[in-house]
Image: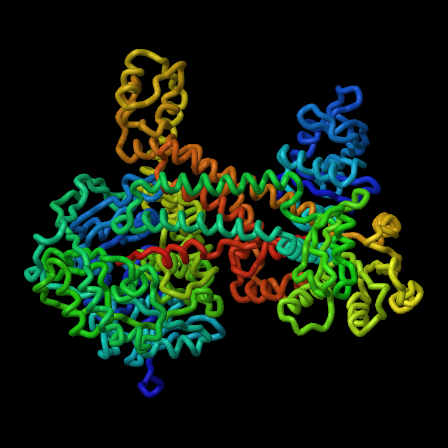
Amino acid sequence: MNTDTIAAIATAVSNAGISIIRISGEDALSIIDRIYLSKGGKKKISEVNSHTVHYGYIIENSQVVDEALVLIMKGPNSYTAEDVVEIQCHGGVVVTKRILDIVIKQGARPAEPGEFTKRAFLNGRIDLSQAEAVMDVINAKNDYALKSSIKQLQGNLLSKINEIRKNIIRDIAFIEAALDDPEHISLDNFSEELLTHVSESKIILEKLLSSSDEGRILKEGINTAIIGKPNAGKSSLLNVLLGEERAIVTDIAGTTRDTLEESINIAGIGLNIIDTAGIRKTSDIVEQIGVSKAKKWIEEADLVIYVVDASSELDVNDRDIISLIENKKAIILLNKIDLNIKVKEEEIRNITGKDVISISAKEKLGIDQFKDTIMHMFFTGNIDFNDEIYITNARHKQAIQESLDSLEQVVRSIKDQMPEDFYSIDLMSAYERLGTIIGESIEDDLVNTIFSEFCMGK
Amino acid sequence: MGIRMAYIYESYDVVVVGAGHAGCEAALASARLGLNTIVFTISMDSVALMPCNPNVGGSSKGHLVREIDALGGEMGKNIDKTYIQSKMLNESKGPAVHSLRAQADKMEYSRTMRGVLESTDNLTLKQGEVVEILSEDGKVTGVKTYSGAIYPCKAVVLCTGTYLKARCIYGDVSNYTGPNGLSAANYLTESLKNLGIEMFRFKTGTPARIDKRSIDFSKMIEQKGDDKIVPFSFTNTAEDIQKEQISCWLTYTNEQTHEIIRENLDRSPIYSGAIEGTGPRYCPSIEDKVVRFADKERHQVFIEPEGNYTNEMYIGGMSSSLPEDVQYKMYRSVAGLENAKIVRNAYAIEYDCINPMQLKSTLEFKNVKGLFSGGQFNGSSGYEEAAAQGLIAGINAALKVLNREQVVIDRSSAYIGVLIDDLVTKGTREPYRMMTSRAEYRLILRQDNADSRLTKIGYSIGLISEERYQNLLNKEKMIQDEILRLENTNIGATKDVQEILDKNNSTLLKSGTTLAELVRRPELSYEIVKGIDKKRVDLPDDVKEQVNINIKYDGYIKRQLKQVEQFKKLENKLIPSDIDYNNINSLRNEAKQKLVSVKPLSVGQASRISGVSPADISVLLVYLEQLRRS
C-alpha cells in the first residue's frame, strides 16, 4: 500500500568502513539515474539488469560527491519487494550524510523508524514467524528516535519551533474564529498582518535550515561526558582538546557551575563533549544542580571520560564516581602527572577495570595516547552510538523544508488575493509538520486556541 | 418503576425516543424505508421544537443541513417552508466557507414538521415517556413507558435531547424540567446505566425573550436578509420559496451592563458551584464573556424575531443564568432595551447525556445490539448536529432491521462524517458543535456540492427518488461537459478580449490561453468571461456555480483530493471486530487501552484516536498482515 520512496543510511555510520544508503520504492531507480554517473558517463541504471553492481560516481550539480558502488535489486526480488537501490560509499560520515541529503532532495522521503522492515513484511518478504520481531523493531526504533530526537534538539531550536507554532496557530485560530462567527469577528486588513507574521516565521525557518546543512539540527556524534571531582582538570582537558580557552579555568574548586557542551572531532570521529560540574558532596545549591545534571549525563552518555587528580588521594567522591561509571564505557585520565603523584595508574586500573592513561592537561602530555585510545575503541566497535540520529535529522530537515513551502504557499495565496480561508489550509500544514519535529500531534490545539483567545457565540 | 403493572401494548420494527430534530429525522428515515416505526414525545406540542435560537444553519451548520437534504432528510425542506429571513454568510470568502443561515418561524417550523410526520406512512407519533430499554443477551427487545406499556421492537433510536434528568436554573431558582418548562424524563438514565452505559452531565443555556413592543429599534442597526436567497433543499429553486423577509436587529452591551454582571457574579449558579454540568465554550453566557474577555468594552447583541405571529424576540448573545432581578437590570442596560418587558427569563439547563465513545460509527451502541442514538443525547449541541445524527441513526436502525449493510459516511465525504467520527473516536467533554475548521477536507466538503457528494448514497439507501437521482446525474454531466469545453477553448489576444481584461483590471494577454485559465484569475470568473465566450449556452445557476468553483480552485481542490486518496487507503483497511489488542505485544499499553475501548472499524479511525502513535499504527498494520496470512 506504500508506494512512496524511502531512504536511509543502512549501516552504522563511522569513518572507517563502507557506508550504505538504501533507497526503496517506485522512484528508487529514477532517483539513482539522476545522481549516478558511470565511469564512461553513459550507463543508465534504470536500464541495467537486476541484481547487478555498478561502479561510478554520485554527483550533484555535475560535481562528483564520492565514488560509489551501486547495487540494483528490482522488485519483487528485493528485501522490501519494491525496487531497491543501495549506494555503497566510503567517504566517511560527512559524505554519507550528504548523499542521503541528495537522495532526499531528488524525491525520496526519510524512512520512518523500522520502515524498511515493515515494508518487507507487508510485502511478504519476511516470514510470518518473524512478525513479532518486526513489530518489536518498529516500536524499539521509534522509541529511540523519539527519545534521541527530543534529547538532541538544540535548546533554542525547540523554543524557536514552539514559538513559530504558537504564532501560526494563533493566526489560524483568528481566521477560523472569524469564519465561524463572521458577524462578530472581521478579517478586514488581516492579510497584511498575516503576511508580516508569515515572513518573520519564514526567516527563522530559513536560518534553521541553512544551519542544518551543517548538520546542526540534532547533534550527531558520540555523547561524551567528562566527569571528575572539582578541580581535577576537566575544563583544562577540554580546552586542550578544543585548542582554546572555552571553559573557565581557575584554581578554585567548583568553578564549572553548569555543563558546557562542545563538539570536537578526533580523527573524523565526532564527540559531543559535556563538561560537567565536578562531582562532590556539596551544600552549594547552584552546584548541586550541576552535579545532579552530571549524574544524568553519565547515564545518557555513550562514553565517559573520568578525570582523576593524580596529585591528591582518592576519596569518598572518587568512589561515588567509580560506582556511577561501573557499567559504562569509560576512559580514565590520570591528570596532573606533572605534579607530586599520589595516585598510581595501577591502583585505579585495579579498582575500575577500565583503560587508564596518564596525562598532564597543563603540559599537554599523554593527549595523543588518549586520542589513539578513542579511535581504537571506535573502530573496534567498542563505542558506538545510535545511527537513527542521522535519519531523524534528515526527517527534521524535510519537515522544516515542507513547513517553509507551506508558508511560501500562504504568501502566494495572499498575493493572489485568495479568500482568507485558503490561508489556514497551508498554515495548518506548516503547523503540523513543525509539530512532528518536537513530537507533538495537533489534537485539539486549534479548537482550544479559538475558544480561549476569541470571544464568540450566541 | 417496577411497581406499575407491565403489559404488552404494540410491536414495532423501530422505536424512536424523542421527537426533536434528531428524533424527527430518525423516525422519518426509518418509516420511509418501509419499517413500522413509532416515535415517542414527552408532549405532542414539542415536536421539532426550537427551544433556543430561532434559526437554522450558520457557519458549518448550514453545510450539515444541505447534507441532510442531499441524503433525503427533512430539515432543509422544512426550513425552506418556514423561514422568515435568509442569509448566505461569508460570501466574500472562499466557497468552502459560504454558509447558509435562515431565521425560522419557530412555531411554524414545529407545526410543519409535525405535519410531515403525521402524513408519513408507517409512522406513529405518540405522547409518552419511555422509562426503560428492554434487552436480552445484549440485544434490544423493546421499550417500556411510564404507564407500564411495553412496545416490543427490533431496534431503538434514542434522541432524548436535553430532557434526561433535566434541570433549569437561574439564580437560586432551580426547576426540574426540560426546556420551556416541559416535563423532564427522569427515569431512563437509570435503565441506561443498568445496561452498562456511561453517562455524562452537560449544560447549556438560552437568553431571555423580550416583547417586541417594548423594544426601541431606532437605537439598533437593522439586519436584512439577502435579496436573492438560496434554498437549503436541493429540491427547491430560489423562485419556489422567495418571500418577503423580516429583519433582525443589532445592538451592543456596554460598560454599565458589564458592571451589573460583575457586581452580581457571586449570585450566578455557575460561579457559586450550583451547576455541575460542563458547558460549551463556543456559546458562553454573557457573564462568561464578561469574565473571560474582560478587556472587551462591548459585546454584540442580536435581536431576532421568533416568528410571524408572536411578539417574542430572542436576545442572541446574552444567554445567562443570573437571578431574575439581575437579568432585569442587565437587559435593560442595553441600548434599545431600556424598557424591555421580559417574556421568558434566560436560564441554564443541565441534562444527562452519554459518552459518545461508546458508539460505533454507525451510531449503534457497541455493547447493546439494536440500540442506536443521535443528537444532544450523544453529547453534541445544536439543531443541525442533532438532525444529522438522527438521520444516520435512523437509517442504520432501519438497515439493521432489514438486514442490510450499515452506512458509515467518512470524513472525506461530509461534515456529517466529521461530526460522527469526532464524537465516536475522540469523544467530547463539552457539548460538541460543528465548525468548518474541524473538517480537514473542507474545500471538497462545500455546501454547494452536498448533492454530488451524498445524493447517490441517499439513493442507494432508498431515501432519494429515481427522478431526483436522474436530475443529479444530468447536472453532473452538464458540469463536466462545460468544464471540459472551457479547458479546451483557446482564446487569442484579440482586441475585444483585451478590452474585457482591461475593464476588469486583469493583465492583458501576450499570447493565447484557454478560457479556463482566464476563469482561474482571481479578478475574473465564469460570469465575467461570458463576453469572450462565443459558444456559451446558458446553463442553470447551480451548474454555473459548480463550473466556476471547480475551475477557479482546481489546484487547491486537486491537492485535497490527493490527501483524500491517502486518507482512504487507511480508511479502507478494516479491522476485524474480534481483534484482541492485548495479543499484540509490541503495542504500547496506552495504545492498547484506547484501541480496546474505541474498537475502531478501520486503521484510519484507529490513527485518529488520541494516544495511538504512528508507530502503533505500523505495528497494527503488521499484525493485521500477520492475521491475514495465518
Q: Residue at the right extreme? A: A346
Residue located at (33% from left, 11% from top) = B494
Q: Is residue B137 above or below residue B210?
A: below
Horizontal and vertical percent position of residue A222? 75, 52
Closer to the camera, A218 or B132? A218
Task: Give the quarter of the figure containing the N terminus of chain B.
Answer: bottom left
Whether residue B626 can be seen here: no
Closer to the camera, B139 or A441? A441
Horizontal and vertical percent position of residue A166? 46, 52
- Left or right: residue B143 versus residue A258 is left
Horizontal and vertical percent position of residue B565? 51, 42
- Left or right: residue B492 versus residue B46 is right
Residue B394 location, quadrant: bottom left
Horizontal and vertical percent position of residue B347? 23, 70
Q: Is residue B126 above or below residue A429?
A: below
Closer to the camera, B139 or B207? B207
Residue located at (48% from left, 43% from top) = A201
Whether residue B70 can be seen here: yes
Q: How is the image coloured?
A: rainbow
Q: Is residue B224 above or below residue A134?
A: above
Closer to the camera, A207 or A264? A264
Residue B143 location, quadrant: bottom left
- Left or right: residue B148 versus residue B517 is left
Q: Residue at the bottom extreme? A: B3
Task: Give the quarter of the figure containing the C terminus of chain B.
Answer: bottom right
Residue located at (13% from left, 49% from top) = B222
